[in-house]
Image (cartoon, rainbow, N blue to C red):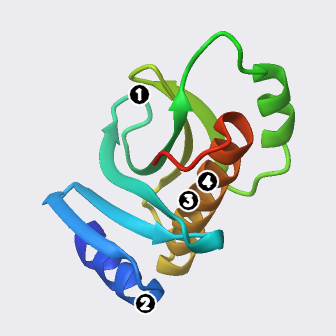
Amino acid sequence: MDLPALMKKYAEQIGGQYTEYDPSQSIIIVPVSGGRFQTVVGLITKNDLYNRTLISLRSKVCPARSGIDYKMLLEQATFFNYCRFIIKDNYLQTEATASLISISEETIKEMVQEVANLADQFEMKLTGTDIY
């Protein structure tokens, strides 16, 4: 899977912005509701435990802190198609991960959009402002 080509093409389709770091990492600035934008990082990694190549799409929600209702977030995640909440580098983030084996471009586009939309939604819910 050529992640940079796919992410660039999708960014053009949705009126977003694309940045390539290297062949395994790309960034799209995704337009979301309310005229806002959300940054989604795409990363291809190797899972040694299962010997699979994975695509991971992430977006920051807000800094992780003790005042966040994490139980509510876990309950909300049961309604998501692809996403889950993670804490990485001390940030609450939305993440969608899948094996690259036989995944379609359309599914990856849906994953990017869900990651962006949910990160934006919960960023507004938890912080009341547009940070990322």
- In the rendered image, residue 127, in percent from the top left (x then y), is placed at 65, 36
Viewport quadrant of the N terminus = bottom left
| Residue at position x 29%, y 78% in the image | 8
Gap in angstroms between the C-alphas marked 2 and 1:
35 Å
Q: Nearer the viewer, mark 2 or mark 1?
A: 2
State the image coordinates of residue 42 (x, y, percent, origin top left): 36, 55
| Three-letter residue code for mark 4 | Asp
Residue 124 is left or right of residue 77, and the answer is left
The reply to whether discs 3 and 4 touch (Cβ–Cβ < 8 Å) is: yes
Q: Kindly identify which residue carries mark 1.
A: 49
Q: Earlier in the sequence, mark 2 or mark 3?
A: 2
Dot 3 corresponds to which residue?
116
Tell me: 64 left or right of 101.
Answer: right
Q: Residues within 10 Å of mark 1 (few under 14, many from 20)?
A: few
Q: Residue at x 36, y 66 (%)?
A: 28
Few, some or many residues within 10 Å of mark 3 (<14, 14–19, 20+) = many
Q: Earlier in the sequence, mark 2 or mark 4?
A: 2
Q: Judging from the image, what secondary structure is the residue with disc 4 in?
A: helix
Instruction: Report the mark closest to the observer, 2 or 4.
Output: 4
Helix, strand or loop at disc 2?
Answer: helix
Across and down, in percent, residue 43 comes to: 32, 50
